[in-house]
Image (tube, grey):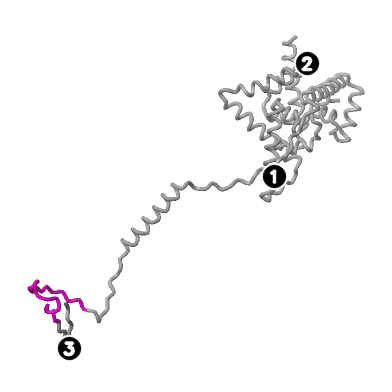
Amino acid sequence: MNCINNETIQRYIDNEATSEEILYVNTHVSKCKHCAQIINRKRNLSETIKNSFNKLVDEDFDIPSFTPPLVARKQRKPLTRKFAIAFAAAAVIVFAVIVTPTGDIKNENTRIITDNYYYETDANSAAGSQSCLSVVITDAEGNIKQYYIE
Amino acid sequence: MFRVAKKMVNCNQIASDIVQDVFISLYQKLNNGDIIRQPAAWLYRATYNKCIDHFRVQSSFSDNSILENCYANDDQSDKSEMIYTVNNVLSKMNPSEKLLTVLYSEGLSYKEIAEVTGIKQTSVGKTLARTLQKFEQKFKSQYYELH
């Protein structure tokens, strides 16, 4: 009959062995003194370990009460950082406005006429007596329009 | 949870902090609407993870005088050399082995241990036998060194 392996002995000691294993161990131990000694030794070891480990923990210890953690507030951005962000945003907007082509409104009814005209005025004369510049425009249909520019 | 944390880190104050952190994590998780299928296993697992975090922080400290004080006070309160040796051996085990041994000492069933550690339930016995054997060897060598 083969001797019992360590795994089965451990399970037997810890009451985790199956009914077949328990039967096998009991039958074997009745005939094999060597295995009986091993089982006794391992049982003592297990008890010693459990006892000595449990002595590590003081029996009377205070369990501190549990306080739920506070909800963390969102950190506010510092004022200088706020200003920096606002300034950057404003700069971007201004740049966009400058760069974007405005697109001249092309109106067919609009005509731009540029001309230079010099005339002398008498600075000593009265304001009401100064002459006006008269512009006469005749369109394609023969309509005449006259403008006075002071 | 406190017992597991205490056995893992060997300091009452740190264990208390770890338990608090675990409950805060649980609170936030539940507030976010997450579902925890195995609450007990989750709590043990979270405690273990917080202990791992603590070990990482501890290892990154160049000046860990506060922690040394904490351990020194605990050492003074220890009454027997056996407890001192157990602590010493535990501190030299890797975290997953330590957790397995601690959970075993807490009397958890193999099913519960499997849920917490992620080991298959069928492999818990084998892993446990191996870990306890390793613990026994280290314990004996250290305990006999003292005497």
Range shown magenta:
A111-134
Q: Nearer the viewer, residue B98 or A125?
A: A125
Which residue corresponds to mark 1?
A: B27
Circle 1: residue type: Tyr
B117 is higher (above) or lower (below) than A120: above
Sequence-first disc among 2 and 1: 1
Q: Residues under labels 3 and 2: Cα distance?
A: 124 Å
Residue A144 got which mark?
A: 3
The nearer-to-camera label among 3 and 2 is 3
Which residue is painted at 67% across and 37% down in the image?
A: B21
Q: Label 3: state its secondary structure.
A: strand
Q: Which chain does tag 3 point to? A: A
Q: Which chain does tag 2 point to? A: B
Give how far across and how far down residue A65 sits, in percent. Answer: 74, 37
Q: Which chain does tag 1 point to? A: B
Circle 3: residue type: Ile
